[in-house]
Image: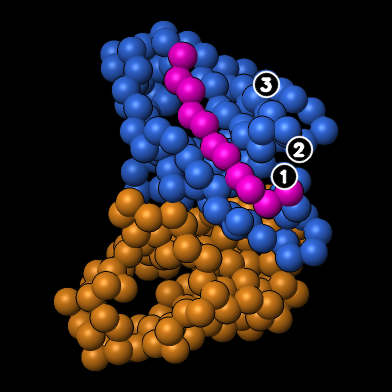
Chain colours: A orange, B blue
């Protein structure tokens, strides 16, 4: 079992659809993160959860809605996305926010 | 002041050569500097990291050099192999206060056989 598991690996959706990305970590970490990775851009931090509490929302549009039901699971709910939201969405976890992050393999999202 | 500037954007090295990737930062609150390696279709994987109390850290063929006064750090890959072909990201973390984790823009390394 890999440390950080993301599902699905690929997702194609229309602009009016609603879908969710799932992240699960088996490392006993207390902090979890969502990142957006687009071509030729730095990794963009979207959300940070520390001990299940959201501690950072990096000016992310409301069409992205995170949920952290427990310290092992993190979701990213998507609705009415735009074509420019097509990217690789990476989940990461760390022991706490001051420790190095471990990444999943991402969900490749394509918006039609 | 939150940026981490990484160069070059891409790098081609012959097998057996030395690959060098550089990063520079501004914020003196950063006190942890990891490097990540990312293969196509995979997430970034932590490769090696350094704290500013040392000037160099070596793990196998990978070495981080750190220059605190210049606020620069670099990754050296000795005896580069085709299997090292990947995208490398530097990052900087402030482990207290704001806990900011800032990534560089990445360097795409290709090692020719």
Residue range in magenta is B18-28
Where's residue A32, x and y in %?
Answer: 63, 67
Mark linked to residue B32: 1
Mark 2 falls within which chain?
Answer: B
Marks 3 and 1 on same chain: yes
Circle 3: element type:
strand
Sequence order check: which comes first, mark 2 or mark 3? 2
Where's residue B26, x and y in %?
Answer: 63, 48
Mark linked to residue B63: none
Give the labeled residue for mark 3. B58
Q: Residue B111 lies in what quarter of the image?
A: top left
Task: Reply above or below: B75 against B101.
Answer: above
Say left or right for A33 vs B67.
left
Q: Residue at x 68, y 51 (%)?
A: B27
Q: Nearer the viewer, residue A106 or A82?
A: A82
Circle 2: element type:
loop
Circle 1: element type:
loop
């Amino acid at each position: 079992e890999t440390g950080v598991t993301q599902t699905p690996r690929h997702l194609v959706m229309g602009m009016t659809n609603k879908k969710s990305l799932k992240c699960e970590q088996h490392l006993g970490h207390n902090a979890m993160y969502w990142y957006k990775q687009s071509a030729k851009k730095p990794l963009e931090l979207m959300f940070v959860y520390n001990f299940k509490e959201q501690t950072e929302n990096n000016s992310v549009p409301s069409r992205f809605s995170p949920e952290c039901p427990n310290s092992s699971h993190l979701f990213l709910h998507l609705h009415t996305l735009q074509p420019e939201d097509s990217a690789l969405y990476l989940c990461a976890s760390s022991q706490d926010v001051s420790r190095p992050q471990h990444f999943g393999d991402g969900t490749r999202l394509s918006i039609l | 002041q939150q940026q981490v500037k990484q160069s070059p954007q891409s790098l081609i090295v012959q097998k057996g050569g030395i690959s060098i990737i550089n990063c520079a930062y501004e914020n003196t609150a950063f006190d942890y500097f990891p490097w990540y390696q990312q293969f196509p279709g995979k997430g970034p994987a932590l490769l090696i990291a350094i704290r500013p109390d040392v000037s160099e850290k070596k793990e196998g063929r990978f070495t981080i050099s750190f220059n605190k006064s210049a606020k620069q750090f670099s990754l050296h890959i000795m005896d580069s192999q085709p299997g090292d072909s990947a995208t490398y990201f530097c990052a900087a973390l402030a482990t207290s206060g704001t806990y900011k984790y800032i990534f560089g823009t990445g360097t795409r390394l290709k090692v020719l056989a």
